[in-house]
Image: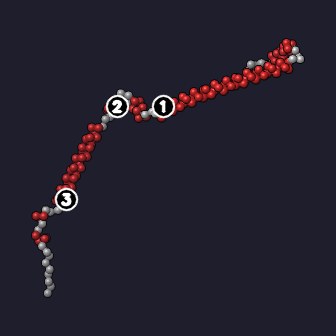
Amino acid sequence: MFDIGWQELFIVAVLAILVVGPRDLPRTLRTVMSYIRKAKGMAREFQNGIDEVAREVELDDIRKEANSIANMDLEKEVQETLDPTGSLNASMDMSDVQSAIQESADAMNKDEVTARDGATAAAEPAPSEVPDTALAEPTQKTSG
């Protein structure tokens, strides 16, 4: 921390004994140590306060980012990223192809219905075409 070796500490101790005197040295050391403890405590509180503010700011930033992601229109973002001018979307417009397919499907369904109706009509003879013998009651042969 301060990179003080034993030689420097020895010099400080000798100076403290000479300046303060051996009789008042323990009381002076206690006073100095209490000031050092107070300074360390204040530094610790300050550091904890700074850390708390940093966490709150970071949480606010994360909360804002999460809200922006939650409210983001993903389809719109992808569209703007891939095709900002809209030319790709216009070139891939399939509405005319879809309408042509729908018209073809409708025409095929109409032809199918017409063919089915024609086949049904051909399979059933008209009432005027039914022979009279078919309408007559069958005769019973008597054996005898």
- Determine the secondary structure under disc 1: helix
Label pair 2/3, CB-CB below 8 angstroms = no
Foreground pick, 83 / 71? 71
Number of other residues with Cα within 10 Å of mark 2, as a class: few under 14, some 14 to 19, many 20 or more:
few
The residue tagged 3 is: 120
Question: Could you tell me how many numbered marks the image carries?
Answer: 3
The answer to whether residue 7 is seen in the rendering is no
Q: Quadrant of the N terminus?
A: top right
Query: Vertical placement of 91 versus 18: above or below?
Result: below
Tell me residue 143's x, y (percent). 15, 85
The residue tagged 1 is: 68
- First in sequence: mark 2 or mark 3? 2
Three-letter residue code for mark 3: Thr
Three-letter residue code for mark 1: Ser
The residue tagged 2 is: 88
Q: Quadrant of residue 8?
A: top right
Tell me residue 90's x, y (percent). 32, 32
Residue at left offset 87%, top offset 14%: 21
Number of other residues with Cα within 10 Å of mark 3, as a class: few under 14, some 14 to 19, many 20 or more:
few
The residue most toward the bottom is 144
